[in-house]
């Protein structure tokens, strides 16, 4: 039996969790910085780093308290080492090193995106491997082939924006709150998904992949009445806001679904798992699940708390790394990419 403390600070959530044997969640604490970044419509790295510094120790304390454990009860520390905002990653890594060093505990460094894949498989009631994993968040939109928690190979990624980033930018154009995913999705429920035919990405060479910058530009030009050089109207002057939100969401969901199912088909894999903040999206859950079923493919979405950034997935994948003996030494650095 191994009990790990996981620490996550790669972007705008300060999180700590205590997890036993990679699956039994004893506690999970997440402090979101959303309110601090909302006025800027996106994450400001300097604000993120400073906020992590203020919150990291209280969040770690709360995770231990909720688990009713002490540092002495731990068998190891897992921390997000990459990728992310460098100043933010360093806060988590330095904290994890300090705890591990002073308590004589092993330290493992976790890849944040691989942890999202782990998170997506963690609650699955059947053996999820091998599978196609889609990680779709504010910073990433990437497809992987996952053969085990520690054997994850990228298949394709976005050429430009991440899907979550596109939601955030369209929310900004429509005068909706940050983060854009939930607010665009709520407005989309009142609109017509077929009202505007926004473009779906297709690679010129036919390969699997994603791109969302063309879609974002198409939304902008639509708001300008089809005249690229016209001024962008104030959100309250846009009459078809709900239709724009619904048609945009449909374009994102359609693109994510088509490319993911192509990957499953081409690799001959019968299972898909989805992780990252955009995996909370209701329409994506519905459309991907339905179309996958037509192909005989099963899709697993984690519960919303494990879609967005959390430390359970860090302690979970950390358990696998520790079991494989892949510990860090004290000179280990954080890596932005
Ligand atoms: O995984 P996450 O918490 O942080 C990153 O690592 O980026 O994902 C945050 C992203 C944001 O861009 C947010 O707009 C998006 O996930 N998101 C959603 C929904 N909930 C969150 N996008 C679409 N629909 C949602 N319901
Ligand atoms: Zn993430």
Image (tube, rainbow, N blue to C red):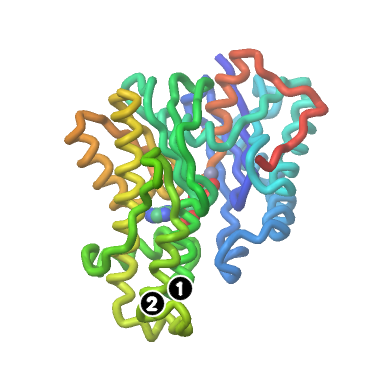
Among the two numbered marks 2 and 1 on one chain, the one whose residue lies closer to the N terminus: 1
What secondary structure is marked by label 1? helix
Q: Observer-nearest residue: 145 or 322? A: 145
Q: In x, y percent, where is residue 152?
A: 50, 25
Residue ID at (28%, 25%): 270
In the picture provided, is 148 more to the left or to the right than 82?
left
> Which picture quadrant has residue 48?
bottom right
Q: Residue at x 49, y 61 (%)?
A: 179
Q: Quadrant of the C terminus?
A: top right
Residues packed near mark 2 inside 10 Å, few (<14), some (14 to 19) or many (20 plus): many
**From the viewer's perspective, is residue 78 above or below residue 204?**
above
Question: Which residue bears the numbered disc 1?
Answer: 173
Contact between marks 2 and 1 (CB within 8 A): the answer is yes
How packed is label 1: few (under 14 Cα within 10 Å), some, or many (20 or more)? some
Percent position of residue 324, x then y? 60, 13
**In front here: 131 or 63?**
131
Disc 2 target residue: 223
Q: How many marks?
A: 2
In this view, the residue farthest toward the front is: 205
Q: Residue at (48%, 70%) from the top-left corner?
A: 172
Q: Label 2 CB, ligand 1: below 8 Å? A: no
Residue 38 in the image, given as x and y percentages of width and height: 56, 66
Q: Is residue 38 left or right of residue 277?
A: right
Q: Is residue 202 visible?
A: yes
Check the image and name the residue furthest to the left: 294
Say left or right for 171 vs 110. left
Q: Is residue 38 above or below residue 284?
A: below
């Amino acid at each position: 039996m191994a009990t790990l403390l996981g620490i996550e600070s790669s972007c705008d959530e300060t999180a700590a969790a205590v997890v036993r044997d990679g699956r039994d969640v004893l506690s999970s604490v997440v402090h979101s910085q959303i309110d601090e970044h909302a006025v800027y419509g996106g994450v400001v790295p300097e604000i993120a780093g400073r906020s992590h510094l203020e919150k990291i120790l209280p969040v770690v304390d709360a995770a231990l308290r909720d688990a009713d454990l002490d540092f002495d009860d731990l068998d190891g520390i897992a921390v997000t080492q990459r990728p992310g905002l460098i100043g933010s990653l360093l806060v988590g890594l330095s904290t994890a090193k300090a705890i591990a060093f002073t308590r004589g505990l092993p330290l493992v460094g976790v890849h944040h995106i691989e942890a999202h894949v782990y998170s997506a498989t963690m609650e699955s009631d059947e053996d999820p491997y091998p599978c196609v994993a889609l990680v779709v968040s504010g910073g990433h939109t990437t497809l992987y082939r996952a053969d085990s928690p520690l054997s994850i190979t990228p298949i394709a990624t976005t050429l430009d924006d991440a899907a979550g980033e596109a939601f955030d930018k369209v929310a900004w154009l429509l005068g909706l709150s940050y983060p854009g995913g939930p607010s665009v999705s709520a407005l989309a429920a009142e609109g017509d998904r077929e009202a505007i035919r926004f473009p779906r990405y297709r690679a010129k060479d036919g390969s699997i992949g994603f791109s969302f910058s063309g879609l974002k530009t198409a939304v902008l030009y639509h708001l300008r009445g089809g005249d690229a050089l016209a001024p962008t109207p104030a959100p309250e002057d846009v009459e078809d806001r709900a239709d724009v939100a619904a048609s945009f969401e449909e374009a994102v969901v359609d693109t994510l679904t088509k490319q993911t199912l192509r990957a499953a088909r081409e690799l001959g894999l019968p299972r898909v798992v989805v992780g990252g903040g955009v995996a909370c999206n209701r329409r994506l859950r519905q459309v991907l699940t339905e179309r996958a079923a037509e192909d005989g493919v099963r899709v697993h979405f984690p519960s919303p708390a494990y879609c967005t950034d959390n430390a359970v997935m860090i302690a979970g994948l950390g358990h696998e790394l520790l079991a494989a003996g892949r510990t860090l030494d004290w000179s280990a650095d954080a890596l932005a990419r």
